[in-house]
Amino acid sequence: MVEYTYSVVPIPFSPLPQSHVDKHASLRLLALETNPECFSSTLEDERRLSPEQWRGRIDTEDRVTFIAASSFADTSDSSTLLDDDTAKWVGLVTVLTPEFLQERWVDLPRKFRKFAMRSGKPAHVLVSMWVHPEHRHKGLGRLLISQAVDWVKNRVEKSGVEDKRGDVVLEVFKQNTGAVMLYRAMGFEDIEEVSPSIWMGRKIA
């Protein structure tokens, strides 16, 4: 049996090599192709994105994407893991910051605005959560969510952030029972069911 070592690391904002853009795009498209029922976006739509649009998704400080990578090598130096050609990108989750939401507020779907503002100010929102089928049931989903939540905690504790926007919310399709159970186990509570989805959230102490 093949034994992998797994690590979860954020894609650094800058400098952003083209290889990171390409790997992220490939992983996202694979997620949409493999589990289209888990996403509101479609494979056809995202295949039409330009190279500049793909770069714009991760080359910005108002959102951060965490990558789960598998490797046979020693991953003690996680800062270089994403550059390792032998490491495979096998999962991801993205955090949208309140600044990201505010900048695009008028263009967001109505339900998105409602739940992102549940405490009276924009929350951090988790999107695009996915793990490759061959690497599931190894704790990667939990690790991705944990890293994302810890990033939010650290961010809101910084003095540069004006207020403590301590809510994290997400949308999950009700039929995705595995993901629903994972989020509940990690402290997310149901906010409201808006068929076919459930909106969930948790406070960041």
Image: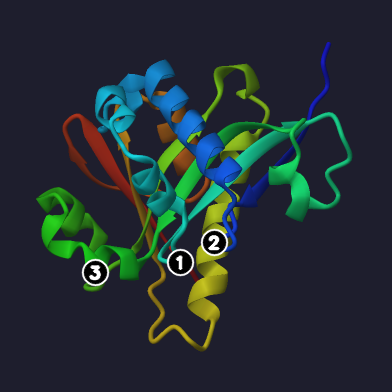
Residue type at mark 1?
A: Glu
Mark 3 neighbour class, 10 Å CA radius: few under 14, some 14 to 19, many 20 or more = some
**Mark toward the viewer: 1 or 3:** 1
The residue under label 1 is 61
Q: What residue is drawn where x is 22% and y is 56%?
A: 115
Which x, y percent locates residue 169? 35, 54
Circle 3: residue type: Gln
Element at label 2: loop
Is the Cβ of the residue at disc 1 closer than 8 Å to that at disc 2? yes
Q: Is residue 135 above or below residue 166?
A: above
Task: Give the Cα separation between the discs numbered 2 and 3.
Answer: 20 Å
N-terminal-most mark, 2 or 3: 2
Cα distance in 3D space between marks 1 and 2: 6 Å
Can residue 21 be seen by looking at this rendering? yes
Q: Position of residue 163 (x, y in %)?
A: 38, 84
| Foreground residue among 193 and 43 | 43
Amino acid type, label 2: Phe
Q: Which residue is mark 3?
A: 102
As displayed, is residue 8 above or below residue 43? below
Is there any visible trace of residue 118 in the rendered image? no
